[in-house]
Image (spheres, rainbow, N blue to C red):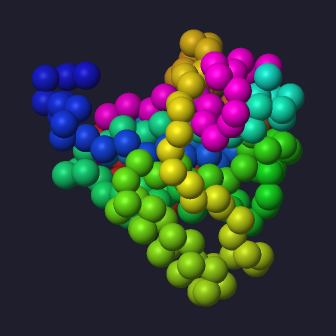
Amino acid sequence: MDQTSPTPQQTDTITLGAGCFWCVEAVFQELKGVVSVTSGYMGGHVKNPSYKEVCNGTTGHAEVAQVVYDPKVITVDEILEVFWQTHDPTTLNRQGADVGTQYRSAIFFHNEMQRSRAQFYKEKLDKSGAFRAPIVTEITPSSAFYVAENYHQDYYAQNGEQGYCQMVIRPKLEKFRKVFADKLRK
């Protein structure tokens, strides 16, 4: 964090599940106003789950990215706009080839304003026909957040030449960068 970064009292946090957390992390790290993005697990019933346990689908956790942001620079509405447009919120427990409850579309809100805005946009998008099928994104209160193993943090930045990064994350990032060019860090 540089010296101009906001203090924790000036930031807000939202936790998002939109498939593989490597993809979600890579997208949100590029947004102006995002202070940090941490890959982890939320929404399950097992304490301190491992990646292997979560991938087995028995812990109830979703792979998530916990996004800390400066609301003076980026609003929750803008974060939700990116969320809705960078994954398919109509597929239950699936994003592309990633299948399982750990890949579900989820917004874990940290305050009433986030819940209200998420619900508003979910209903608005459903009514508008923006998607070909109903949105299945769960909107639930945040719960215990478990930070994923170190090798999952900054995954794309550290493993950009890896096959999954090239075939899945890079095309998603390229599309995201075109659509949200005005919201990217310089």
Residue situated in front as seen by the camera: 9 or 1: 9
Instruction: Look at the image and tell me whether residue 21 can be seen.
Output: no
Q: Is residue 120 above or below residue 1?
A: below
Which quadrant does the C terminus fall into? Answer: top left
Residue 54, by quadrant, is top right
Q: Is residue 132 left or right of residue 151?
A: right
Picture coordinates of residue 92 (x, y %)? 80, 58
Q: How many marks?
A: 0
Picture coordinates of residue 165 (x, y %)? 69, 31
Is residue 43 covered in magenta?
yes
Residue situated in front as seen by the camera: 109 or 19: 109
Q: Is residue 117 above or below residue 63?
A: below
Residue 41, by quadrant, is top right
Q: Is residue 174 left or right of residue 1?
A: right
Tell me which segment is drawn in magenta: 33-52
The residue lying at 84 percent from left, 43 percent from top is: 100
The residue lying at 79 percent from left, 22 percent from top is: 53
Instruction: Look at the image and tell me whether residue 84 can be seen.
Output: yes
Q: Is residue 170 above or below residue 77?
A: above
Picture coordinates of residue 52 (x, y %)? 80, 20
